[in-house]
Image: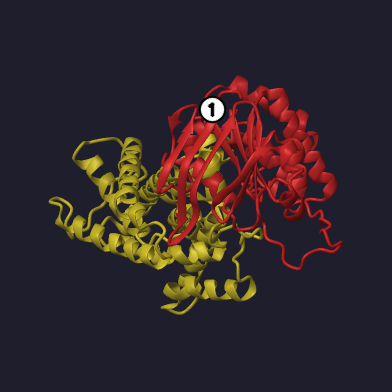
Chain colours: A red, B yellow
Amino acid sequence: MAQSMLELANVESSYGPVQALRGVSLSVPEGRIVTVLGANGAGKSTILKTISGIIDPQKGQVKLRGVEIQGRAPDQVVRAGVVHVPEGREVFPLLSVEDNLRMGAYTRRDPDGVAQDLEAVFGYFPVLRERAQQEAGQLSGGQQQMLAIARALLAKPQLMLMDEPSLGLSPKLTKEIFEIIVRINRERGTTILLVEQNAHMALKIADWGYVLEVGRIVMEDSCARLAEKEDIREFYLGVKAEGVRGKRRWKKKKQWR
Amino acid sequence: MVQFVQMLLAGTAQGCVYALVALGFVLIYKATETVNFAQGDLMMLGAFFALSGGTLIGLPYWAVILFAALVMAIVGMLIERVVIRPVLGHPAFTVVMITIGVGYVLRGVVTMVPGWGTETYALSTPFGQKVLRVGGAVIAVQELAVIGMTAALCLVLYLFFRYSKLGVAMQASSQNQLAAYYMGIPVRRVNMLIWGLSAAVAAFAGILLAPVTFVHSNMGFIGLKAFPAAVVGGFGSVPGAIVGGLIIGVVEALAGRYLPEGFKDVAAYVVVLIVLFVRPSGIFGETTMKKV
């Protein structure tokens, strides 16, 4: 396995009295796409927020290339090369698309590099070039998602944290977005940690997957193998298994085998 | 007619001061969702610094403006860092009470400083009592200067917010604070700079107001007029604050001339009531709701 870009060791985070992560350990190898699957409330987004410094973990370490970054302020984490594409897009609604993109490059001090990346990003998302002067709040949901990804790219990240990029998008748009995520990974060598409800898509593009249930990692494997597991197929992919007796058991227990 | 034009100009000049104080309210409100009730007192403090800059250090008028703005920017940033930041995340009411407290403290401190005290001072300006005669109208140069300087400041602020990276980042973090964090904008530092900017604008307003009301420890109560100006313009809108201030200033001046005595002082609030009846979100009220 390639050298690991990001390493989480026994991370515990909570929102006030509610503990959302109960000791999560995972590793993201450099240049790969790693996905975290899980139901609503499993703590997927919390993992990302803990990495990007929005939430400080109570215990455990977050290591970026071996350097501990847990507890750092969010802007320090961005400067270290980690950008978070938040769930629900979170664009700056009253700024123009172009200004949104420039804010993505806020931490950078190389205008030439920014201009180059701006061109590259317009290459990935031509529609953003057409809308460059429009207010971001007027874009459609899909375009806003593209803007959110493009904005994050402008920070020139080594590691991108993506939180539900398919949220609220049509199947066609979802497919497009995922294709671009793969392109970003292949062409720019950006490591990606992807959190998704859409397990089908996530398992298709990612190399390695973790399954998170109520704040704990219950399973990890390569995505090809995960997609074959019975429990994954049933609970995440919605493929109904035929029982031995020819019909489905009323209440099936997850066994994570 | 001549008199009307004169009143209009005087009202506009007064409105400019309201506009600048209102601008201070709006900047801080947009950035931190809190109303800074000490804005008027920051203005008062700025005027005192300008006074000392002129009399003690002997700076010329233009340098006095820069000096007071700079000192007040530091004061504003200190207030944010020391008093406001620790209570962020608490209910807005807490922060509002704290700003009211800060206002009282500033007023108290000013009366204790030797050379400031409770006296009333005149801030000398290069315009003095000079007047221009255009047609039959007598126009004070002072008023024209106030209007011109306000316009210049607005232009500078517009260019700053529109084109500078920091200015755009200030807008960005006020529109979506969480996303600003995600993009690596140091939101806390940006908010501190906004307090500094707002206090500097207040100092500017204080210097412009000084020839009209003189400099004394209670001149900050003009904030009570600037607040309606911000509401009329649509709280949270920068152009709204300017327009609101001008409207209040002009209406007040005309009410003082043409309506029975006493109307002048309530005119601002009458305007607020009317505007709120017709357009509850104010003249420039934002149509896009901010994501909180």
Q: Is residue A204 left or right of residue A42?
A: right
- Judged left or right of residue A105, residue B21 is left
Q: Viewer-proximal residue, B290 or A237?
A: A237
Percent position (x, y) of residue B181?
Answer: 51, 44
Tell me where residue A244 appears, x and y as whole percent: 82, 58
| Residue at 15% from the left image edge and 52% from the top image edge | B113
In the picture as drawn, the residue positioned furthest to the left comes out as B114
**Quarter where residue A157 is shown:** top right
Question: Label 1 sits on what residue type?
Answer: Arg
Per the image, the residue denoted by label 1 is A108
Question: Can you say whether B174 is above or below A252 in the image?
Answer: above
Q: Residue furthest top?
A: A112
Quadrant of image for the N terminus of chain B = bottom right
Label count reads 1
Q: Which residue extends farthest front?
A: A245
| B196 on left or right of A92 | left
Front position in the image: B156 or B264 = B156
Residue pictured at 70% horizontal, 41% vertical: A147
- The answer to whether residue B149 shows anywhere in this view is no
Q: Secondary structure at mark 1?
A: loop
Disc 1: CA contacts within 10 A as few (<14), some (14-19) or many (>=20): some
Q: Is residue A208 visible?
A: yes
Which one is in front, A200 or B271?
A200
For the C terminus of chain B, the image quarter is bottom right
- Chain letter for mark 1: A
Residue B48: x %, y % from top left: 26, 50
Q: Residue at x 61, y 62 (%)?
A: B285
Residue B241 in picture, x, y percent from top left: 52, 57
